[in-house]
Image: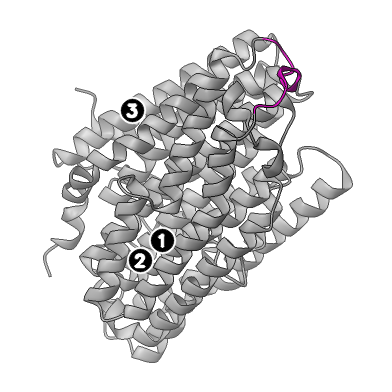
Amino acid sequence: MIAAHILLMICLGAPLAQAFAAAAAPRPPGLRDTLQIALSLTHFIAACLLFGATRGGAEARLVLARPLPHVELAFALEPLGVLMALVASGLGMLHAFHSAAYLRAVAEPAPARMQAFMALASFAASALAFSANLFTFFVAIQALTLATFPLVAHAGDDEARRAARVYLATLLTASIGLLLPAIVWTYAITERLEFSALGVFTPPVDAVTLNALLVLFVLGVAAVGLPPVHRWLPSSALAPFPAVASIQGVAVANAGGIGVLKITTYVFGPRLAEAQIAAQGLMALAGAAMCAAALIALSKQDIRERLAYSMMAQSAAVAMAALIALPTGTFAAALQVVAQACAATTLAMAAATAHAATGRDRAADFAGLGRLMPWTFAAFALAAASLIGMPPFSGAWARLWLITAAADAGYLWAGGLVALAAVLSFAHWGPLASNALVGPAPPPEALKRPDGASILLVAPVIVAAAATAALLFLADPIATFLSAIWRAPA
């Protein structure tokens, strides 16, 4: 059996090796793509083994530097991070197959550059998931922002560069202007930044300080997409399709969810109950953002923009559940992150496959494409159903647990906002998916090639959709795995 600390190093090192391989071996494309797929598979296998080791009680810690007293650049195993790393690595593996095929199908002029930065984004997301303290967490967020910024600007035109500037400015302003002061303030109070199931604020801290810090921390993790630090998400819709899948499905939105969960669970812990004024205000903000984003998504015809606003609504649900913080709230947030990552990646890859085969990327132009590409759009419809929260898909269970958590905490209004957001999500995904499957078939000339999309474009979409459906049977094992968090000794 491979030692847990070796597996941890592989999980962090494999994406870095992917980025290096893409940059060092841009040609021949066959070798580059083989290296990308092989290293992403290595990453996923290591994450699976690490998941099993953590479930068996294994512990591991990797320290790279000690810049300040009681502050380390360190990575460690804990249930939330290991679960999210497993999800991200599995989706990243499927995305490696899909992106290699997509970049060839559309004759992308700079495929190696895109693959390198997507791999760096995967590394940064893994680093955030495994971060052992707030210092490492902050460094990982900066790395994730800097790795994904070039993906938004990849097209190189004026519109892409403007979107990239907004993307970069939003994420950096939030992290440096809000998150960093919160971390410094926490260190000044406690002289420690280490994540713990008991929280960081074990010394007495007044309620006013806790409320102020909660606002700074949650809004500082801008990757979760709460207003007013949400503009990065619509800006990311200007990125090419593989980059959209990486940002909105595999890496950034996923990292935002795990980031807020780490803050509420391992920084505040039981002391979150003393910051209820800020928690309820942020929950109200998340609920309003959830409904508004789902409504705006309905007006967007570009499928990448629709997905961006839909993901904003999904991520707001994560923030709301994490702020409730009961065991049911923590579990609802974790399940929501997993469900939305799988569904969003499936949707983004399915839309990319349709674009590669037909050149279409507008919602109105998807009508009837399911008759020409049945497997792709069956997967698209399944993922859309999960994002909507339709039973029995995993998204429905996440919403149910969120509503249950809200009811347990006495926040019936929060449960009502979740239900309203689900209805609005159905409005922007339901008709689109049904029209794609049962609408009049477009002429065969809609396909750029007579044989349609290649198997490497379709197979990852089908597997991702199968994973989304399989989450229905994995909710209980996930709850058992995460139970160590809320069973921590008081």
Above/below status of 205 relative to 266: below
* Residue where numbered disc 3 is placed: 46
Left or right: residue 159 compared with residue 259: right
Q: Are marks 1 and 3 in contact (CB under 8 Å)?
A: no
* Residue where numbered disc 2 is placed: 322
Could you say where residue 120 lies in the image, as x and y percent from the top left?
57, 37
Could you say where residue 380 lies in the image, as x and y percent from the top left?
51, 36
Q: Is residue 180 visible?
A: no
Q: Are marks 2 and 1 in contact (CB under 8 Å)?
A: yes
| Quadrant in the picture for residue 327 | bottom left
Could you say where residue 266 lies in the image, as x and y percent from the top left?
31, 64
- As measured in the structure, the alpha-carbon distance from the residue carrying label 3 to the one carrying label 2 is 28 Å
Residue at 28% from the left image edge and 65% from the top image edge: 329
Q: Which residues are magenta?
A: 441-450
Left or right: residue 357 compared with residue 19: right
Lower sequence index among marks 1 and 3: 3
Q: Main secondary structure of the magenta part?
A: loop
Q: Secondary structure at mark 2?
A: helix
Bin the neighbour count of mark 2 within 10 Å (Cα to Cα): few under 14, some 14-19, many 20 and up: many
**In the current view of this chain or complex, which residue is farthest to the front?**
440
